[in-house]
Image: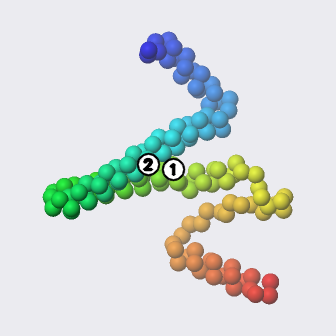
Amino acid sequence: MPLSEEEQRLLEQLEVALAADDPNLASALRGSKLRARNRRRAMVSVVGFVVGIAALMVGVIVAITPLGVVGFVIMLGSAYAFLIAWRSGVGSRAEAAASREREPSSSGGRGVSRIQPATSGSFMDRMEERWRRRRDSGPGN
């Protein structure tokens, strides 16, 4: 049963008030819906990939080339959809960082942060920085 216009307006006002009162809670609620949707997309993509493999194999075994090609295209499309869903929220770095921030620190109160600062730059810049840190710490340090 759909909501009336009055109920929709009241619901929107409640959502705005919640976001103003506790923005962290509102953000967490919005994020959980997005992650759930991306998880569903990822699972559908996995099922599509399996269907594509089956179509490809049947096409090869029965010697129906167009079926094999269709199966391969389904596999490629499913893999692409899975990667998009994974990057968007299922396995994104932002989600991993947020979950690490919520976990209690296992450093025993030594003040060591488990989250490393985000690095920008090219791959070679990051490798050079690692090399400098290793060289500076040295075997005797």
Contact (Cβ within 8 Å) of mark 2 with mark 1: yes
User: The disc labelled 2 sits on which kind of residue?
Assistant: Ala
Q: Nearer the viewer, residue 109 or 118?
A: 109
Q: Residue at coordinates 54% horizontally, 22% vertically from top-left?
A: 12
Looking at the rendered structure, the secondary structure element under dot 2 is helix
Image position, residue 17 (x, y; %):
63, 25
Q: Nearer the viewer, residue 137 or 87?
A: 87
Residue 133 location, quadrant: bottom right
Residue reaching furthest right? 109
Above or below: residue 124 compared with residue 62: below
Above or below: residue 134 compared with residue 32: below
Q: Residue at coordinates 44% horizontally, 48% vertically from top-left?
A: 42
Image position, residue 53 (x, y; %):
31, 57
Q: Residues within 10 Å of mark 2 (few under 14, many from 20)?
A: many
Is 137 situated left or right of 54 in this image? right
Q: Earlier in the sequence, mark 2 or mark 1?
A: 2
Residue 31 location, quadrant: top right
User: The disc labelled 1 sits on which kind of residue?
Assistant: Val
Which quadrant: the N terminus? top left
Whether residue 10 is visible: yes
Residue pointed to by mark 2: 42
Residue pointed to by mark 1: 90
Q: Residue at coordinates 52% horizontally, 74% vertically from top-left?
A: 123
Which quadrant: the C terminus? bottom right
Looking at the rendered structure, the secondary structure element under dot 1 is helix
Image position, residue 37 (x, y; %):
47, 40
Q: CA distance from mark 2 to mark 1?
A: 8 Å
Is 47 situated left or right of 99 in this image? left
Above or below: residue 76 compared with residue 7: below
Above or below: residue 2 compared with residue 104: above
Q: Residue at coordinates 20% horizontally, 58% vertically from top-left?
A: 59
| 2 or 1: mark nearer the eye | 2
